[in-house]
Amino acid sequence: MPSIIIVSLIDVLLVVLIFLMLTTTAKQQPSVRLALPETKQPNKSGTTEKALVVTMTKQGPIYLNRDPVTLESLQRKLTEAVRANPQTTLAIRADTDAAWGQVVKVVQAANAAHIPVSSAFVKVAP
């Protein structure tokens, strides 16, 4: 009767596990469903890679990168970010149905923290 060499099986499983860990990408955006505005002119590549991302949904929550924030704490966190890195920029990722007043308040918080708004996330129209 043949015997099963368990050590080789464990080695193969570890290799597969390491492969999966290295090839899986981590999401940088919160898992919030958004209907992005459409445009015929796509963003320039690389403009949002290093930027802080503010996400706004139509229901109202605001996220700075992955963390939920209020408008009051957003300005404080943006000010802290610009102190840490004066080259900080901001990208806005807002739902098509998000309140326009809320978008304006986010831009005002960025202006108060002296952070330029570099771009907005959009969906390229066909």
Image (tube, rainbow, N blue to C red):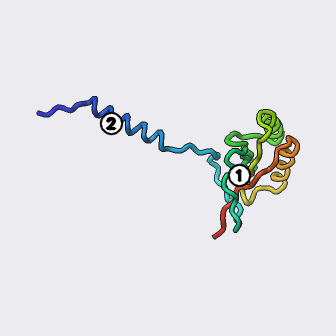
Q: Tag 2: Cα neighbours inside 10 Å, few (<14), some, or many (≥20)?
A: few
Judge by depth and name the residue closer to the eye, 57 or 39: 39
At which x and y percent is residue 43?
70, 59
Residue in the image at 70% along x and 68% along y:
40
Above or below — where is 38 with respect to 47?
below
At numbered mark 1, what does the secondary structure look like: helix, strand or loop? loop
Residue in the image at 28% along x and 29% along y:
7
- Look at mark 2 in the image and give the residue it sits on: 12
Judge by depth and name the residue closer to the eye, 23 or 64: 23
Above or below — where is 26 with respect to 101?
above
Query: In which quadrant of the rendered image does the C terminus lie?
Result: bottom right
- Look at mark 1 in the image and give the residue it sits on: 47
At which x and y percent is residue 94?
73, 54
Quarter where residue 39 is shown:
bottom right
Judge by depth and name the residue closer to the eye, 90 or 68: 90
Query: In which quadrant of the rendered image does the N terminus lie?
Result: top left
Q: Tag 1: Cα neighbours inside 10 Å, few (<14), some, or many (≥20)?
A: some
As drawn, the label of residue 94 is: none
- Residue type highlighted by circle 1: Thr
Residue in the image at 76% along x and 47% along y:
90
At which x and y percent is residue 118?
77, 51
Quarter where residue 69 is shown:
top right
